[in-house]
Image (cartoon, rainbow, N blue to C red):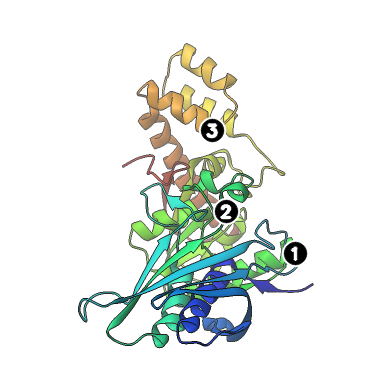
Amino acid sequence: MKSGYTLPVFAIAAAKAAILALSNQNSSLVKMDLLEAGIGEIAIAQSAVIDQNTALAIAISDPGDNLDLTAGTPVWAWVSLEERPNEDSSQLILEAGEGLGRTAQGEPAIYQLAKNLAEVNLIPLLSRNISARVRFILPEGKAIAKRTSNAAFGIFEGLSLLGTSAISKPLSVEEKLDEFREDLQKKAAISSELAFYIGANGYQVAQNLEFETSQLVQTANWVGAMLVEAALLGVTSITLVGYHGKLLKLAGGIFNTSSHLADARIDILVRAAVHVNLSLDIIQRIEKLPTAEAIHQLLVEQDCDRPVFEYLTQQITQRAAAYIHKYTDRQVKVRTILCDRLGKLVLS
């Protein structure tokens, strides 16, 4: 199976090609520093100089043999070189154009990997007194985003430049878990206090809580396996961060959160509502709602969300700590932070 590159690589490659075009260096390939992944060459479909300070280039996304909706998507980078106001001002201004999404806070959905790639590949091309304004455009981005769960994770109006590595490597389910475990092993060697996150919204919330990147560990659906692994590696504190509709499964003792294995979210929410003595009318309405998100909205409207989610947070924390102790005989401090689909804290 063929590996490829993640979307941020093609975005920065297009930006690099545009900057090179402004110095009459047109090329169908650009060499890229891919950080820990080494050096790579990215094909450029087109580049054009618009005026003496502005150029546009296009790369075509190729994630390899992954089931990735962005395969074949054109990624445009519009670059304008500007005089840098002073030494303290940034040399790179990265913007969201058409088809590149924005977060719930209105920020461009351009994450750390893309920023790091931009710094190492673009800044060396710029004179100290010049800055580059880079606008990423994905003409098919809005249409593709409708077929993804981006909106569920707080990314709206398009795709995101998100990734943990420049390489897009096709992996089996077992290999993917091994990849997460390897990442956990590296980070547990650096810090005994980690944050486990599920999805892009959990990642952003954890960053907003001022966890270092070296403390952030993705679990996907394998929360239980990763908790046990962390304890065996000597981790003493774990903060679980993520969408309530996923993590609340832990309150019911479900430690693989894949809906293909178990999905008792409505039952767990009903139990929580009973526990905090909500009215029979609200409990019956909860039973009839189709999603955890809809139930959350109902609870907010009825001004009874706080007791329900305080109870669920306590249950998740207690059950996670007990799960760790059961399989490792170790005590680990666990904390739980729940957010909604937009990345807003459920309890604050």
Q: Is residue 77 visible?
A: yes
Q: Which of marks 2 and 3 is nearer the N terminus?
A: 2
Quarter containing the C terminus = top left
Q: Report the amino acid beneath label 1.
A: Ser
Q: Which residue is drawn at 44% across and 83% down?
A: 120
Say which element carries label 3: helix
Q: Which residue is drawn at 55% across and 44% down?
A: 246
Q: In whole angstroms, how far apart are the C-alphas of marks 2 and 3? A: 28 Å
Say which element carries label 1: loop
Q: In whole angstroms, how far apart are the C-alphas of marks 3 and 1? A: 29 Å
Q: Is residue 241 above or below residue 125?
A: above
Q: Could you classify mark 2 by the number of other residues whose Cα lies within 10 Å: few (under 14), some (14-19), or many (20 or more)?
A: many
Q: In whole angstroms, how far apart are the C-alphas of marks 1 and 2? A: 27 Å
Q: Report the amino acid beneath label 3.
A: Ala
- State the image coordinates of residue 93 (x, y, percent, origin top left): 35, 69
Residue position marked by numbered label 3 in the rendering: 292
In the picture, the disc for residue 11 is: none
Quarter containing the N terminus = bottom right
Horizontal side of residue 137 vs 311, given as left or right: right
Q: Which of marks 1 and 2 is nearer the N terminus?
A: 2
Q: Earlier in the sequence, mark 3 or mark 1?
A: 1
Q: Is residue 165 visible?
A: no
Mark closer to the observer (2, 3)? 2
Residue position marked by numbered label 1 in the rendering: 172
